[in-house]
Image (tube, grey):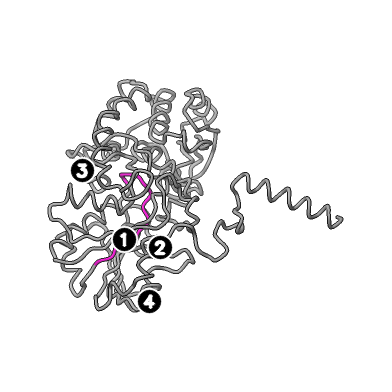
Amino acid sequence: MEPMVWKRTVGIAMAVLLMLGLIGFSGVDGRNGDGGGKVKTGLEVLLEDSERLSGKKVGLITNPTGMTSDYRHGLDAMLDSGIEVVKVYGPEHGVRGTEQAGDTPGSYEDPRTGLPFINLYGKKPEEMVPLFDGVDVLVFDIQDVGTRFYTYIYTMAYTMEAAAQADKEFIVLDRPNPIGGTKVEGPVLDPEYASFVGLFPIPQRHGMTVGELARMFNEEFLGNQADLEVIPMKGWKRTDRFRDTKLPWVLPSPNMPTPETALVYPGTGMIEGTNLSEGRGTTRPFELLGAPYIKGWELAEALNKADLPGVSFREAYFTPTFSKYQGEAVGGVQVHVEDPEQFSPILTGITIIQETKKLYPDQFQWRKNGDSHWIDKLTGSDRIRKQVDEGVPAKKIAKGWKEELEEFNELRSEYLMYPPHGR
């Protein structure tokens, strides 16, 4: 090919990729040329002023997401900066993120640093207090995904409560809400249904960062208030989704591979409360959904006829390598979000459940958790399950959240820290 033709072809290709948002002006990985992103996390703000922890023994609560924009883990970066980390604590999935959902990570000595890595998952605040011996200040640095039933925010709440009981300082290094900080959707949890997948009366999609939630939890819900400091990000706006931040995405948990997974999760995470596979054991968890009894074309056609905003469905077939229907051929759909601004994950999740129940009433089942229904813990009450069983249309169910969301938004506004509506 002639040089001028080659340059023109490359130029056209680059222009197309830029329009599609697949690359930035700084390179295909979407980061700036100096290796940093436009958003600085609370970790990076702390590292610029590491003297604030001078002379203090630090207990770091983290997992693989506690990362700088140049891919250094926060533990290494803190040690390199002279911060004296003496213990490291992990949430569900462990410090290294190796455990599947619900498995209990072990505690062990880190072979690289020699520090104790201590499991907190499954422990109540009073059980955590002795684990904080020898620590002056606890630092929390974990990426959340913006959904009420994701457990890291409750590890944060429990450790804040334990820190208050142990008279320890508590610092939260803030990180972005990867699905944005403007939209608040879904039912607010009924306190009677509190569990480790929903401790406090917040909506299913809360639209807050971990730092903002920490402030709210501390003031509104904890029995003992922690000596709390939140180190905010620099450069984050509430309208940003994760790819806008130019920060590297690190899997927060084994089945949260991409920011797009996080976007659908507030809705399709509810599939865990049924006998449908939520796609665990595939490369597209929470986007691939189905069961052996489903004919993919039937469900896809019904869901596309529902005319849900910002999303389409295609028939899909998959064989999970673990979890529900391991090794079985499963029919179902793949969720394709076309317009994240219009997309309503929770309305979508309820519609998927409803249409499956209509098409396959003899095979569809709610998943039981002992004597209770798992869906009730995920949605924060028995209301949605009963409405689905009664045949109430999904869009009418969604209208029922309006009043409680207005009340929550009034409370939420007191704790927002970032523009356009933060303080």
Left or right of residue 213, residue 347 in this image: right
Neighbour class for label 3 at 10 Å: few (<14), some, many (≥20)?
some
Kind of element beneath mark 4? loop
Question: Which residue is at 25% across, 78% downward?
Answer: 55
* Kind of residue sitting beneath label 1: Ile
Q: Earlier in the sequence, mark 2 or mark 4?
A: 2
Question: Which residue is at 18% across, 40% downward?
Answer: 191
Q: What stretch is highlighted in magenta?
A: 138-149
> Of discs 3 and 1, which sits in the foreground?
1
* Image coordinates for residue 151, horizontal then vertical, percent: 30, 51
Q: Earlier in the sequence, mark 3 or mark 4?
A: 4
* Image coordinates for residue 238, horizontal then vertical, percent: 40, 46
Kind of element beneath mark 3? loop
Kind of element beneath mark 2? loop
* Image coordinates for residue 294, horizontal then vertical, percent: 48, 31
Considering only vertical position in the picture, is 15 above or below 310? below
Left or right of residue 28, residue 309 in this image: left
Mark 4 and mark 1 residues within 8 Å of each other at the beta carbon: no
* Kind of residue sitting beneath label 2: Pro
> Of discs 3 and 4, which sits in the foreground?
4
Q: Which mark is residue 194?
A: 3
Q: Earlier in the sequence, mark 4 or mark 1?
A: 4
Q: Is the magenta stretch mostly helix, strand or loop?
A: loop
Considering only vertical position in the picture, is 21 above or below 93? above
Look at mark 2 in the image and give the residue it sits on.
Answer: 64
**Quadrant for the N terminus in the image:** bottom right
Label 3 to label 4, Cα distance in Å? 40 Å
Kind of element beneath mark 1? strand
Look at mark 1 in the image and give the residue it sits on.
Answer: 231
Neighbour class for label 1 at 10 Å: few (<14), some, many (≥20)?
some
Q: Does the magenta stretch include residue 148?
A: yes
